[in-house]
Amino acid sequence: MDNSSEELKKNCPLNKDCDWNFKFNSEYNYYDLPIYKCNTCNLETIYPKDKYDLKTMYEASYYQGNQAYSYIDERKNEKHESYVWDARIKNIMKFKKEGKFLDIGSSFGGFLSRARSFGFESYGVEISNYSAKYANDRGIPTFKGSILDANFPEKSFDVITLIEVIEHLDKPDLVFEKLASILNDDGLLVIQTANFDGSQAKNKGPKYHYYLPGHLYYYSLGNLKLILTKLGFKNFVSYYGVDFPLMAKLKKSRGSFKTLLDYLKWFKIAYYHLQSKLFKGSTSSMVLYAFK
Ligand SMILES: [Zn+2]
């Protein structure tokens, strides 16, 4: 075996003695990412990780679609995004009704400003200068940088959310440790990412659209629970698909509709949503709620 295995073991969020092996080069789009997989726990990663320049990735162009890999600028569509944000916050409130709410990867602060309107005390962490500044200017206290550099005291948050964030982390082992330390004993950790145990990921193989530059680790419901269990989390509620009702998704989608024909997309959205719920594990979307 080449020396990739030793280096992969070092940053592994699970076991430092995992059995990493080359799996394939991804075939989604032109990215051609070298993917390694642990045969013990099914965790996957890109190796080496420096094929694309991540340092410049999250500045303004990330939100304007000019880069190889970009993110939709939520500010153009806050009203429609809010249908999903509100629905998610209402679901979180089944477990935690108040307190300090930290969103990591908080972008322009839209989700946090909704959390505040429901009575939470909102805080953000955002790696992008561009969006962190916007969030602070609108009054959402946002630490600009990595969560690893933020000086939050131990046990200071009641809810911590990472929505499509953990796949971006290059030192997930340290981040998971930090999350466990800054969450209150009766707090709730919410993680959304793709579930690589789902049939969607398995069937698409190297063509799966989640293999993107910037997505450094690929998890499954199983190994995510293992990682968190090692850090003292004991109770889990897992959602296949998403943690809020279909209606919120349908209402949100209208934000990008231009003609009546676009409403046909509702069939596709509804089909995916129902498939996730009725045939658990058939799609690769998941949200995990974890409690210590
Ligand atoms: Zn492993």
Image (cartoon, helix red, strand yellow):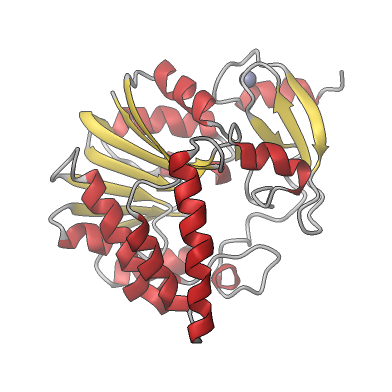
Residue 269: x and y, percent? 49, 61
Residue 141 visible within the image: no
Which residue is located at x 58 percent, y 16 percent?
15
Q: Quadrant of residue 142?
A: bottom left
As drawn, is 39 to the left or to the right of 104? Answer: right
As drawn, is 261 to the left or to the right of 50? Answer: left
Furthest residue to the right? 1
Which residue is located at x 48 percent, y 20 percent?
226
Residue 244 visible within the image: yes
For the residue pair 107 and 194, the one nearer the viewer reads as: 194
Q: Above or below — where is 124 with respect to 7?
A: below
Figure label count: 0
Which residue is located at x 32 percent, y 28 percent?
181
Residue 10: x and y, percent? 64, 22
For the residue pair 190 and 6, the one nearer the viewer reads as: 190
Residue 18: x and y, percent? 66, 16
**Quarter of the N terminus within the rendering:** top right
Residue 103: x and y, percent? 34, 50
Taking the image as four quarters, which one is ligand 1 found in? Answer: top right
